Image (cartoon, helix red, strand yellow):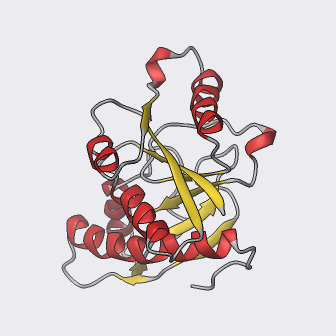
């Protein structure tokens, strides 16, 4: 059974969702560590409350993205993690060769559109609405050297409804994330091909 590190920057909702999915058997993996990018992240108390140890690694403590990333990976390595899942992680990670193909991320838009620097959270939903799109939805992808760029593993499509606010759309996309990420992770761990949207 693969071991996971769950990286988060905020409330830890996606991390808690994956932890629950692992514990109830929907994902054949065992989370061994949470990594938070700020001591203010609400997810720290939530994950520790579920018995998962959490390390805090803060970007401003390091001179470069590479040094920061290496500190994150050292924490994951020390806990014995084999796969990293980014769960609302907002810091740039440099991906060394030893971690290529073993880091997953969930993004709240249909990549390759609405990705890249600055495109996270409510910014994505606002951009989707401003563009007049008829649908949105989350994407699970592998992480590489570019923001929101790596191979897409799974997507879910969520309709944009007349009169939607960014908050309305966010709620429906988030519900789809809760369903999609465990399924995509389970498929990835089983070596199955990309999940079709």
Q: Nearer the viewer, residue 72 or 81?
A: 81
- Answer yes or no: is residue 112 visible: no
On screen, 115 above or below 156?
A: above
- Residue 60 x %, y %: 45, 18
On screen, 135 above or below 171?
A: below
Q: Is residue 7 left or right of residue 78?
A: left
Q: What residue is rendered at 36% in x and 31% in y?
A: 38
Q: Quadrant of the N terminus?
A: bottom right
On screen, 155 above or below 66?
A: below
Q: What residue is rendered at 63% in x and 34% in y?
A: 73
Q: What residue is rendered at 36% in x and 48% in y?
A: 51
Quadrant of residue 128 within the rendered picture: bottom left
Quadrant of residue 151 within the rendered picture: bottom right
Quadrant of residue 127 within the rendered picture: bottom left
Q: How many numbered marks, from 0 up? A: 0
Residue that lies at the very extreme toward the right in this rendered image: 97
Q: Is residue 184 left or right of residue 90?
A: right
- Answer yes or no: is residue 154 visible: yes
- Residue 181 x %, y %: 49, 70
Q: Is residue 162 left or right of residue 76?
A: left
Q: What residue is rendered at 33% in x and 53% in y?
A: 50
Q: Is residue 191 left or right of residue 51?
A: right
Q: Nearer the viewer, residue 90 or 124?
A: 90
- Residue 172 x %, y %: 30, 76
Q: Quadrant of the C terminus?
A: bottom right
On screen, 113 above or below 105?
A: below
């Amino acid at each position: 059974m693969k071991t996971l590190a769950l990286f988060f920057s905020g409330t830890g909702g996606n991390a808690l969702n994956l932890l629950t999915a692992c514990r109830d058997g929907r994902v054949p993996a065992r989370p061994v560590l949470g990594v938070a990018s700020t001591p203010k992240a609400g997810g720290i108390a939530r994950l520790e409350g579920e018995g998962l140890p959490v390390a805090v690694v803060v970007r401003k403590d390091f001179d470069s993205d590479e040094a920061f990333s290496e500190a994150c990976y050292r924490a994951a390595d020390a806990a014995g993690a084999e796969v990293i899942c980014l769960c609302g992680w907002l810091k740039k990670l440099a991906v060394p060769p030893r971690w290529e193909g073993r880091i997953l991320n969930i993004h709240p838009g249909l990549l390759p559109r609405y990705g890249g620097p600055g495109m996270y959270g409510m910014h994505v939903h606002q951009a989707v609405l401003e563009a007049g799109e008829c649908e949105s939805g989350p994407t699970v992808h592998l992480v590489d050297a570019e923001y929101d760029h790596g191979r897409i593993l799974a997507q879910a499509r969520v309709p944009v409804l007349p009169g939607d606010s960014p908050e309305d759309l966010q709620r429906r996309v988030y519900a789809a994330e809760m369903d999609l990420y465990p399924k995509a992770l389970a498929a990835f761990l089983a070596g199955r091909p990309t999940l079709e949207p």
